[in-house]
Image: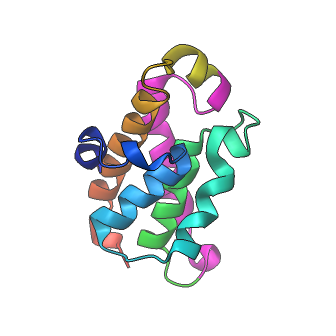
Amino acid sequence: MEKLIETGFFADKDLNCAETILHAANEVHGWNLSHDALVLSAGFGGGVGGQELLCGALTGGVMALGKLFVRDRGHESDLAKTITKDYFAVFEKEMGHIDCAPLKKEHRTEAEGCRKVILASARALDQVVEKYRNEIV
């Protein structure tokens, strides 16, 4: 996913952070999610509806992890929780935070927006997906 985003694949689509990650995961994993499914990520941009809470790039990634690792529902095992915690830890180790406000303050620029944050999320997601590859449903 990181390589896809690095190429600027979604730069012309005016997607928020959550949308960018979910669209990239859809492309990379060949899910062919419908527009209606992809739109579910829209409200998570800007740290959940612009509130600058949990980073939208992370919430988009959590949606992707659910699609990859959950067959029917989250309660079927602790795997989704384990993988999500791992994903957050990898991201936070690189970026220093998981919440939008401090991430924007430290990493957002007028010219590139939150590109650095989105790339870090994609990198963390790629790493965690690779680590748990044998658990994909």
**Residue 47 appears in the figure:** yes
In the image, farthest residue toward the right: 51
Provide residue 62's location: percent of width, then percent of height: 53, 56
In what quadrant of the picture does the C terminus appear? bottom left
Residue 14 falls left or right of residue 6:
right
Q: Give the residue displayed 29% in from the left and 44% down from the top.
A: 2
In the image, farthest residue toward the front: 12
Question: Is residue 97 located in the magenta-colored stretch of the structure?
Answer: yes
Question: Is residue 54 located in the magenta-colored stretch of the structure?
Answer: no
Q: Give the residue displayed 72% in from the left and 36% down from the top.
A: 53
Q: Give the residue displayed 58% in from the left and 75% down from the top.
A: 36
Q: Nearer the viewer, residue 125 or 50?
A: 50
Q: Give the residue displayed 38% in from the left and 77% down from the top.
A: 32
Residue 74 falls left or right of residue 113:
right
**Residue 54 appears in the figure:** no
Residue 122 to residue 33: above or below: above
Q: Main secondary structure of the magenta part?
A: helix
Provide residue 74's location: percent of width, then percent of height: 61, 73
Provide residue 128's location: percent of width, then percent of height: 35, 51
Q: Nearer the viewer, residue 35 or 114?
A: 35
Q: How many marks?
A: 0
Q: Which residues are magenta?
A: 73-101
In the image, farthest residue toward the top: 106
Q: How is the image coloured?
A: rainbow
Residue 110 to residue 67: above or below: above
Provide residue 68's location: percent of width, then percent of height: 41, 70
Residue 99 falls left or right of residue 65:
right
Q: Nearer the viewer, residue 32 or 53?
A: 32
Residue 90 to residue 75: above or below: above
